[in-house]
Image: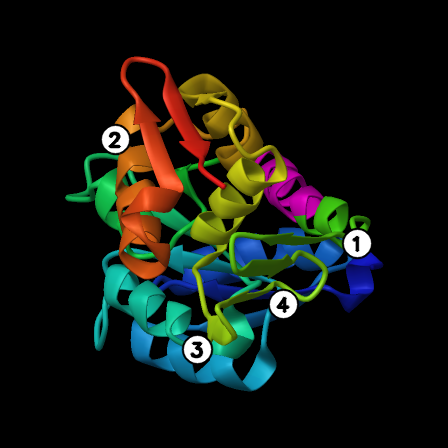
């Protein structure tokens, strides 16, 4: 996918942020759509189906956390990458953001070139996923990475992006114990600093949706998928 085909929804209640960030990203060749609050962000996300959403946390009408939760409920937006743009010292929990379905977070103020670099890194994941055409069939599960679809015992399941990537990773090698460090690296990427508890939260959600017996915790090491 070429840069001029990629849509980025930029959401912030500060006009200066929208202007500066929007200018730098459009200069890179991306299509930029803007929204000034969470409510508007949800509406535009449903309409435009962006590939990436950069979402401020503290906003009027609807804050970023709630907007992220609403967006993640839309099946057509399951492949959309969401990153929070947060101010230093802001009352924001990384865990709350990831729990809402975010893929990443960026701390502001941030230099435009650094922001562009981070956005390029996030969108590289999208390109890597497009290059893979693999379907895993195991234990009643069908995981189609190309179409980003999962069915379990004949019923379709919609998972947020990180839950999908975590499930796909574990299911690629049933029985293998994936260490926490490897999971963080392959699912969250090196540029994201998150704690091990984030993995636990995502595993808990997968257990609720697919079954507790499918995932085994290896204490002090990591997790594995049980066939």
User: How far apart are labels 3 and 1 at the CA level?
Assistant: 24 Å
**Numbered disc in front, either 2 or 1:** 1
First in residue order: circle 4 vs circle 2: 4
Left or right placement of residue 215 versus residue 119 in this view: left
Query: Mark on residue 197?
Result: 2
- Judging by the rendered image, the residue that carries numbered circle 1 is 133
**Numbered disc in front, either 3 or 1:** 1
**Quadrant holding the N terminus:** bottom right
Where residue 95 appears, x then y in whole percent?
A: 25, 41
- Judging by the rendered image, the residue that carries numbered circle 4 is 32
Q: Nearer the viewer, residue 9 or 79?
A: 79
Where residue 33 appears, x then y in whole percent?
A: 57, 72
Query: Mark on residue 74?
Result: 3
Quarter occupied by residue 30: bottom right
SS at mark 4 in the image: strand
Q: Mostly what secondary structure, the magenta segment? A: helix
Magenta-colored span: 112-125
Q: Is residue 13 visible?
A: no
Q: Residues within 10 Å of mark 4 (few under 14, many from 20)?
A: many
First in residue order: circle 2 vs circle 1: 1
**Numbered disc in front, either 4 or 1:** 1
First in residue order: circle 3 vs circle 1: 3
């Amino acid at each position: 996918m070429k840069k001029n085909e990629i849509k980025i929804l930029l959401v912030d209640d500060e006009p200066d942020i929208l202007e500066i960030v929007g200018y730098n990203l459009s200069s890179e060749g991306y299509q930029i759509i803007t929204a000034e609050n969470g409510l508007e962000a949800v509406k535009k996300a449903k309409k435009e189906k962006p590939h990436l959403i950069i979402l401020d946390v503290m906003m009027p009408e609807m804050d970023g956390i709630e907007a992220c939760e609403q967006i993640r409920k839309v099946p057509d937006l399951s492949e959309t990458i969401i990153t929070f743009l947060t101010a230093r010292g802001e009352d924001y929990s990384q865990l709350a953001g990831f729990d809402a379905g975010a893929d990443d977070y960026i701390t502001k103020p941030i230099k435009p070139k650094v922001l562009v670099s981070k956005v390029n890194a996030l969108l590289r994941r999208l390109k890597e996923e497009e290059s893979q055409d693999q379907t895993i069939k195991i234990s009643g599960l069908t995981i189609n990475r190309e179409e980003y679809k999962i069915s379990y015992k004949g019923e379709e399941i919609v998972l947020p992006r990180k839950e999908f990537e975590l499930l796909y990773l574990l299911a690629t090698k049933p029985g293998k114990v994936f260490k926490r460090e490897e999971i963080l690296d392959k699912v969250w990427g090196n540029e994201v600093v998150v704690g091990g508890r984030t993995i636990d939260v995502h595993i808990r959600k997968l257990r609720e949706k697919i079954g507790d017996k499918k995932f085994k915790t290896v204490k002090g090491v990591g997790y594995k998928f049980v066939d």
